[in-house]
Image (tube, rainbow, N blue to C red):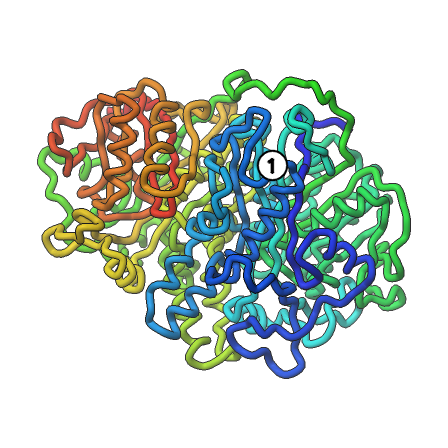
Amino acid sequence: MSGPEQIVVTGVGLATSLGLSARETWEGVLGRRPGMGPMPALESPLPDGHTGGQAAELPADYAPGLPREVRYLRWSVEEAWRQAGLHDRVLSRGLAPERIAIILGTTLHGIRQGGAYLRTGDHRPLEHFLAGSIIEDALGGLPIGGPAITTCSACSSGLASIALGMTLLRAGKVDVVIAGGYDPVSEYVYAGFNSLRLVAAGHLMPFTKGRDGMKLAEGYAITVIERADDAAARGAAALATLLGYGESSDAHHLTQPQPEGEGAARAARAALAMGKVSPDQIGLCSAHATATPNNDAAEFAAMRTVLGDHEPPVVAFKSHLGHTLGAAGAAELILSLMALRDGVVPPTANVDAQNLEFPISLNCAAPRPQAIQATMNMSLGFGGANTCMVMGAPQPRDAHAKRHAPSSGRRTIPVLITGIGVIAPGALGNTALRERFSEADPTPISQDGGTISDESLAQLLNARRVRRMSEYEKLTLAAAAEAFTDAGITDIAAFSAECGAILGSMLGSTSFSESYYRQIVSEGLAAANPMLFAEGVPNAAAAQLSMVYGIKGGCQTVIGTRTSGLDALWLAAQRIAAGEWDRAVVSAGEEFHALASEVWDAWGYRAGPKFVGSARAGRGFFSGSGAAAIILESQSSASARERSPRGRIDVDRSGAASARGVAGLATACERLVRALGPVDGILTSGNGTWLDRVEHLAMRRASYRGAVGSVEGYLPELLSVGPLAGLGAALLTGRLPRHLFGKDPGDNPRVRAMGLLATDFAGLASAVRVTVEPPEA
């Protein structure tokens, strides 16, 4: 069982309804201790007779005053950090903060803070709402200065974040990744799943006749993963080896799985292939097992397809923990790790073997000893987002091995940009975008761009198919349609069958989410609108992208920051460069909403009629709706289509960083600017706030003296969309967009190599280096 460079787990942290540590939770599973009970932390009372999985109580003096999800997340991160031998806040054996990343998966990040705002009208809770802020608060001063990214692929988010961490480690971009998932108890989630009739009144009984749904729970599941040789060199004990992962999309339905489990089976096959593990080597399968009728049936079909006549023991950990949503995949991986370590087949609760609907090897009795060579974890989410991971025991390593060589020593596959599509106010499509950025004397934006009407998108979308979608979803699909056309892709279904997607969004479907939640707050849990719930979750656009265009590779969304679009571009490029993907759709989308404008006003970021902002914010900004999509391909994929690229991503000179405070962020940006190397120009993420000063300070410190451009003034503030829209403008015109608000705007020079730089209010920064091919005449 030897696959690519080995990645090991060196630390775990877990807080669930069964305990505040991985050990307590594991003991609860082995003891068949029930985790379901009252949920007093839920903002609204549960229906009579209903229970759920509220996490065990933290010590009252631990991080008091912080939001619930931040406290539990910090607790679990610190547990994993300590077990990995990272010694509180002191790094040893050559580890540098910028070489440590954190990637977390969640379904709804700080949604509880949204409810607090809706009840009071006080904007202060929203300072802890977005995913970027939650990561910043949860780190609690730990020396983590590398990428800090939050992803969403519905209920597979936790396991998908670990898979992304494996990509970055194998690419040599970082040395340690803190990866996992979280979700707190939430009336928003409970009401939504209940409105879809997926919540059981009684026990969660997976794979049984008469099963009637899931039990909702909260969880915080964290792993520390690193390259095996690096762990051995710093004396860290490996707990298990992550052999391979697989991801897929059903491209079938927003809330129902593909009935035969075809997508889940593809993910499982890919995981086995990456890890070079044969089906008969799997000694334990951890099933997603929500106990909903359709999901269990589809998952059993997938397991039977992949494993054939081999019938390993299967465990359904949700029968003990409940469904912990964004934490589920990571939590169940940690428990599988303990089963592998102890040589135990754990029990599945609430199930009588005589009542099983499927011929499946669930252990319905006490734990039983059994040697396990490898485990397989399945994690399946709304929108058909499937992730599978194969894990084995740690292998002996040389404790005197040298730490791994820098990423520059690795062979990478060229990553080409073959198509772009931008939809923005005043620039609806590539032709309009080229014209806007080619204007000799452009008039700066002086008011909010607002929403983009359905009529404006009519030529790009099937109006009947998208009529019930949010603006965010429609814009994402429209930008992708423009990008497919630009890339010369006529048979989209054939192209997409072997294509992955990573999207970015800071705010997602704000309109649907706010409408859905406001009704719950005013009328109670029973008032939840199932359509708004399903279409309003952060990964809804990724799900719709997969369904509309037939994308069957992994699809997920980077959420909660201005850097999300650029992070998505960087992550997708890493996967192609590493040979894990052959092609990808990268997109960023944002919708204009009055609530967001209200918050920008309250925080002093929004511009007045004449760019008169507060002292805190500078000029301030006007905002609007928009989306941008980029088609990425490997050299072989583009060559097979005889397609000339518009540009190329230099993955070895691109990256992301995190820091606390203005000074720390400026230092992180300086490091990224230096890493870009010689470029003809840098496109900043200017928006008239203090972030502009940080970016320009970083360039001065890095002794950068070249051209500086920005989309600010050409387009309203588009949050995560801005960097990709600017890249689109540069690729279409061959020139760097002028910096309209610089001291000396000058001309917009032609560029051959350019850097994209983006920052976020939570102390995050990303940079991507692009080689620009001359645009067509």
Figure quadrant of residue 258 = bottom right
Residue 432, position as x, y percentages in the image: 22, 41
**Residue on which the image places disc 1:** 86
- Residue 4 appears in view: no
Seen from the viewer's position, the closer of residues 492 and 471 is 471
Identify the residue shown where x is 55% and y is 28%.
95
Q: Residue furthest top?
A: 409
Identify the residue shown where x is 46% and y is 75%.
520
In the rendered view of the protein, which quadrant contains the C terminus? top left
Seen from the viewer's position, the closer of residues 652 and 441 is 652
Determine whether 497 is above or below 63 in the image: above
Q: Classify residue 516 as left or right of residue 386.
A: left
- Residue 626 appears in view: yes
Determine whether 362 is above or below 338 in the image: below
Residue 67, position as x, y percentages in the image: 48, 61
Label 1: which secondary element: loop
Q: Classify residue 260 as left or right of residue 609.
A: right
Identify the residue shown where x is 77% and y is 46%.
338
Figure quadrant of residue 248 = top right
Determine whether 478 is above or below 16 in the image: above
Q: Which amino acid type is shown beneath numbered disc 1? A: Leu
Residue 345, position as x, y percentages in the image: 85, 51
